[in-house]
């Protein structure tokens, strides 16, 4: 409800390790997965919730979310080509999220490797390149950072983060790297319509 999606995903993942047959936990992690850009995982979570669900009051909402998750995962897979599997999508999206967490921890070389591995699996999105650019910049590898940011803009010329970092790069080359980097959650503060369903025991 507070749109702290990363923390929500981690909490539901931990809860599922304790109670793996709880349909409501799978359902809620499906939502958290979606809003952390884990579209493949979201679909799998909703499918598992449907398998386990025995509550008629959850069934209709579950079908609705499952339909949307299938459409979203389908579009995401289509970007990557006909032979890209749902398992590969889950792995690639997980690598990207690992990279973001490593950036937040200031582990720039490890973040770089996570983004490079994600890109190698399927090069179709600007965000891995943009974040790779930041990771390289923070290692003072400015030529490589510039190339990564430019690649992000080839994929999406409107990608604001890459534009801003590319514009800042000449100054950073002269004065050094900034003391900290802000990691932006794409769905945070997005004015989502929030609802919550309470299910009676």
Image: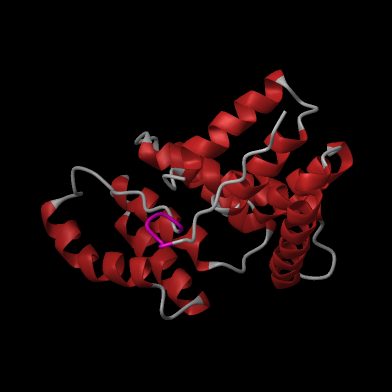
In the image shown, does 164 or 171 lie closer to the viewer? 164
- On the question of residue 41 being in view, the answer is yes
Residue occupying the point 53% across, 40% down = 98
Residue furthest bottom in the image: 157
Say whether residue 111 is visible: no
Residue drawn 40% across and 66% down? Answer: 149
- Residue shown at 41% from the left, 62% from the top: 190
Q: Residue furthest left?
A: 175
| Relative vertical location of residue 158 with respect to residue 75 in this rendering, above or below | below
State the quadrant of the C terminus.
Answer: top right
Q: Residue furthest top?
A: 18
**What residue range appears in magenta?**
187-191
Give the number of marks. Answer: 0
Above or below, 179 against 65 in this view is above
* Residue at (75% x, 68% y) in the render: 71
Q: Does the magenta portion include 169? A: no
For residue 155, side relative to residue 82 (left or right): left
**Is 95 left or right of 87, judged from the image as shown?**
left
Outermost residue, front direction? 200
Magenta stretch holds residue 188: yes
Q: Where is residue 193 in the image (x, y as percent from the top left)?
A: 49, 61
Using residue 27 as the reference point, say whether residue 180 is left or right of it. Answer: left
- Residue 126 location (% of width, % of height): 50, 67
Q: Is the magenta stretch mostly helix, strand or loop?
A: loop
What's the colour scheme? Answer: secondary structure
x and y percentages locating residue 119 in the rendered image? 60, 57
Q: Viewer-proximal residue, 55 or 32?
A: 55
Residue 74, horizontal then vertical, whole percent: 76, 67
């Amino acid at each position: 409800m507070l749109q702290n999606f990363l923390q929500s995903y981690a909490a539901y993942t931990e809860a599922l390790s304790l109670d793996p047959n709880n349909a409501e936990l799978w359902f809620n992690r499906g939502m958290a997965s979606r809003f952390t850009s884990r579209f493949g995982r979201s679909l799998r979570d909703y499918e598992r919730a449907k398998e386990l669900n025995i509550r008629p009051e959850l069934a209709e909402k579950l079908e609705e979310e499952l339909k949307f998750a299938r459409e979203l995962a389908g579009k995401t897979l289509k970007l990557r080509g006909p032979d890209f599997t749902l398992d590969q999508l889950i792995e690639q999206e997980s690598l990207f999220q690992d990279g973001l967490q490593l950036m937040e921890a200031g582990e720039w070389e490890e973040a770089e490797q996570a983004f490079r591995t994600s890109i190698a699996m399927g090069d179709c999105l600007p965000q891995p390149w943009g974040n790779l650019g930041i990771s390289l910049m923070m290692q003072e590898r400015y030529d490589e950072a510039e190339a990564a940011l430019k690649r992000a803009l080839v994929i999406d010329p409107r990608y604001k983060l890459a534009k801003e970092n590319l514009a800042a790069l000449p100054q950073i080359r002269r004065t050094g790297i900034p003391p900290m980097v802000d990691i932006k959650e794409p769905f945070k503060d997005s004015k989502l319509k929030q609802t919550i369903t309470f299910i009676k025991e």
